[in-house]
Amino acid sequence: MNKLKAAVLVICLAAWGNHPGHAQAGRTTWNDYGGTPDNARHFTSNQINRSNLDQLRVAWTYATNDNISYVFNPIIVDNMMYVLARNNSLVAINATTGEEIWVHEGLQGIAPRGINYWESKDRSDRRLLFQLNSYLQAIDARTGKSILTFGKDGAVNLREGLGRDPATIVKTQSSTPGKVFENLIILGSAAGENYMAPAGDLRAFDVVTGKLAWQFHTIPHPGEFGYDTWPPDAYKYIGGVNTWGEITVDPVRGIAYFPLGSPTYDFYGADRHGANLFGTSLLALNARTGKRLWHFQMVHHDLWDYDNVAAPQLTTIQRNGKTIDVVAQAGKTGFMYVFDRVTGESMFPIEERRVPPSEIPGEQAWPTQPFPTAPPPFANQTLTVNDINPYILTPEQRETWKKRIANAANAGLFTPPSLRDTVSIPGAQGGANWGTTAADPSKGIVYVLSINVPSIYKLSNEAPVPGRGGPATPATIARGRTLYQEKCEACHGPELRGDGNYPSLVDITLRVGPETLREVITGGRPGMPSNNDLTQPDLAALVAFLGSTNPATGRGRGAGPAPGAGGGPVVASGGAPGGRTVPSGRAGGMVGPDYPKGVKVPEVRMYTGYGMDGTIVKPPYSTLSAYDLNTGTIKWQIPAGGDDVRAVAAGGKDTGFISQRTGIITTSSGLLFHAGGDAMLRVYDSETGRVIWSAELPSGSRGIPAMYEVNGRQFFVVNATSATEAGSRAMKPGTPRTRGYVAFALPAGQ
């Protein structure tokens, strides 16, 4: 049991100066995903404050000229901003005017949430580093051209070195960009949810050469710490335990913090008896060497897909008369975990409590799980018949759900999946997720955006049906096409491209994943009706059809003009030549190949869908919480992201937005900026959570905004490219709905 606790290694690290590309003093730059290495999303300036918010205006708008819902976090270096636009091209624009500078087009397959910036000490070498089709690549930040001396012909194959045949790995890159520290780029991965997926090893590469600097086995090999928390040779066939979310770095101490996910397969662990370190843990590594410093496992033997995803937040608290630097991790579980940043000691008691055993033969659910006694949870952790949505479900639907919940396995948090309906709340995409945390680094305040989405699991030994990880037959796809024509074509068009008001659905399963797509189809969104009447085979057929769309058919992924139409020269097309060989097949699914010969594993495999439906629970669907970690309390909690117009029409209020997942920015002037899914930008008083200013956006927003200063002028830029959410409220007549990046500022000279 000792190895299940946080292993503490007290270290003495001399502080060193910050890298030029990671300036901390003042926090007036945004040259890193999340703003700074610590992912605080905190900006130090009093230029925009409560007294002049009413003068905030749109400074410029840059249209993406396509129908793609981007989740990209812009980064800014000097007066140059980098964004994704124009059918997945990387575009450099003027940060004060929005004018194009250059376009590197044709980067389909790029990690969608962001890129990394690095510069040499003399600034003669400036690079953008990103993942593209599971290759790590670099381009010149000034010219936009690929750097061919990086890796092999400009690319590093991330499929190599993971203990699997690289030719069988369709995808391993994460959608998030990793972190640059000194001359290293530190990466996690996202290799799929299937049996025999690759392990989620953490790796660091030299930013100049692309050479591997270090590698940490998240599923331990023989002789490594934690190996005895798995069956022998588990590293040969278990996958996952990966950081697909956000890495945080303390650049002064040189510590990298990794929120780690669950092992695969997510919901059945009969082939991985044990606590399964470092699954669903917070792991602190020496950022230079990859050596483990400490860890804490939030979920032993995870059977619920309770990945840690959100950025660990670094802040400083006052406790018992002492000043303590801490790291706070918000989990999918709805818990907030707080640790001493250096030693891993928990700041509040965490109790190991007994939880229900598994009903599945051969499964060995861990008998206890850690429960923080403080701070209180930020998300709902129970679901009863009284929690069924009274507003947007029909009476028949409500009765159906009440019966299902009443008859389900529902013994509270950590009820193991079974052969009957099993309630899990928060579900696989509930609680905190990528992009949803921020902090005031000096005051012990952490903000969390949470979504209240349950999962209803039901295990079966039958392989997933088409659209849920199994193969899609021509007949299934044909049935799905018919359903699309009946239910979707009127809005999204016969070619799936949308019309400017509704998004393109081409390659939608690659962009959001089949299970999220199922949730949207069945639950609906504001401006989009739910389709709860679909049978499981029909739902699977519709998802299979949408998953069969292919850019090679000529549809493309956007409907806008050619890249470069905004004035900037097209300096390159496609990635580096060394990264253009992409394995056939699709990432995702749950089945996977056979186990390797000679390992002792169960004769059967169990499967389940994610069972998510964001509309079955009563509001609020999403919340924004402010924690005071000095006292371990919640200062305030409010509904987040706007209202569901359907629920409001039925008498609801303060509903929050369904599956709201957008970033937060805090400022030293006491403001909190948040772009909602309802195409509204809101500014909150960070002390009270009260909305003190708002403005319309041309479209909805997902992902993380950015704040920066150029020539003494403060700007706030938001990615407003999610047109679906624009239908969540009655927009004013004549309101433009152009997708793009919108920058706000006070009038020049003020």
Image (cartoon, rainbow, N blue to C red):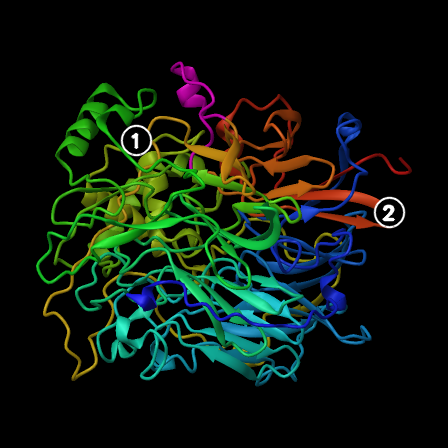
Which residue is more in the foreground, 488 or 601?
Answer: 601
Question: Horizontal placement of 497 versus 529: left or right?
Answer: right
Report helix, strand or loop for mark 1: loop
Report helix, strand or loop for mark 2: loop
| Dot 1 amino acid type | Ile
Task: Please report the residue visible at 64 percent of the width from the left and 77 percent of the height from the top.
Answer: 207
Q: Residues within 10 Å of mark 2 (few under 14, many from 20)?
A: few
Quarter placement of the N terminus: bottom left
Question: Horizontal placement of 143 versus 364: left or right?
Answer: right
Task: Please report the residue visible at 19 percent of the width from the left and 27 percent of the height from the top.
Answer: 402
Residue matched to label 1: 616
Q: Specify the segment rendered in magenta.
A: 643-659
Residue matched to label 2: 712
Q: Does 644 lie within the magenta span?
A: yes
Question: Horizontal placement of 43 versus 160: left or right?
Answer: right
In the image, residue 332 sits, relative to residue 671, either above or below, namely below
The total of numbered circles placed on residues is 2
Q: Residues within 10 Å of mark 1 (few under 14, many from 20)?
A: many
